[in-house]
Image (tube, rainbow, N blue to C red):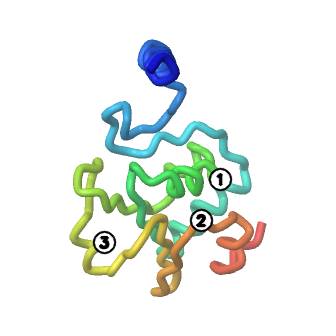
Amino acid sequence: MKRILIPLLVSLTLPSVIHSTHLNNQRELTVTSESTRESIQLAKHLKDNGVVKYSAYWCPNCLNQSELFGKQAYRELNVVECARDGINSQTQLCIDKKIKGFPTWEINGKLILGVLSLKELSKLTGFKN
């Protein structure tokens, strides 16, 4: 019994080290990494070329994808929030587009599921530094 109670009590009394926006009652992704000049240019290129990122604020892969860009570049992206309780949610658009998972990128009318490197996104969209 002690083997169960002690770890349980310790875990309840220590502050949580998990950092996730949905645990803090936020309804949007919080990107903390810094952008590079190149990631900002790529994000602007993606937006200018109609590329859309379908996302959900609670999705860890979406956060990982966004951190690749950094917070300044992330603000440049065209991001559609699919979670019903997310800020500026566009759930019906996500349903209409048949989004099956997150993140999903829409590039030239094609849906691509998963985290893509900045290099992959550059290649798929013809971006050159």
- State which tag comes first along the sequence, 2 or 3: 3
The x and y percentages for residue 67 are 60, 48
Q: Residue 86 location in percent, x, y?
A: 29, 50
| Disc nearer the start of the sequence (3/1) | 1
Please state which of residues 41 and 3 is positioned toward the viewer in this rendering.
Answer: 3
Closest to the camera, between mark 2 and mark 1, is: 2
Q: Which residue is mark 2?
A: 115
37 in relation to 104, above or below: above
In the picture, the disc for residue 8 is none
Q: Label 2 to label 3, Cα distance in Å?
A: 18 Å
The reply to whether callout 2 and callout 1 are in contact (CB within 8 Å) is: yes
**Disc 1 residue type (three-letter):** Leu
Within-10-Å neighbours for mark 3: few <14, some 14–19, many 20+ = some
- Dot 1 falls on a residue whose secondary structure is helix
Query: Which element is circle 2 on?
Result: loop
The spot of residue 34 in percent (x, y) is 66, 40
Extreme-bottom residue of the structure: 109
Identify the residue at image location x=60%, y=67%. 45
Mark 1: few/some/many CA within 10 Å (<14, 14-19, 20+)? many
Amino acid residing under circle 3: Cys
Q: Mark 3 — residue?
A: 94
Q: Which residue was labeled with disc 1?
A: 68
State which tag comes first along the sequence, 2 or 1.
1
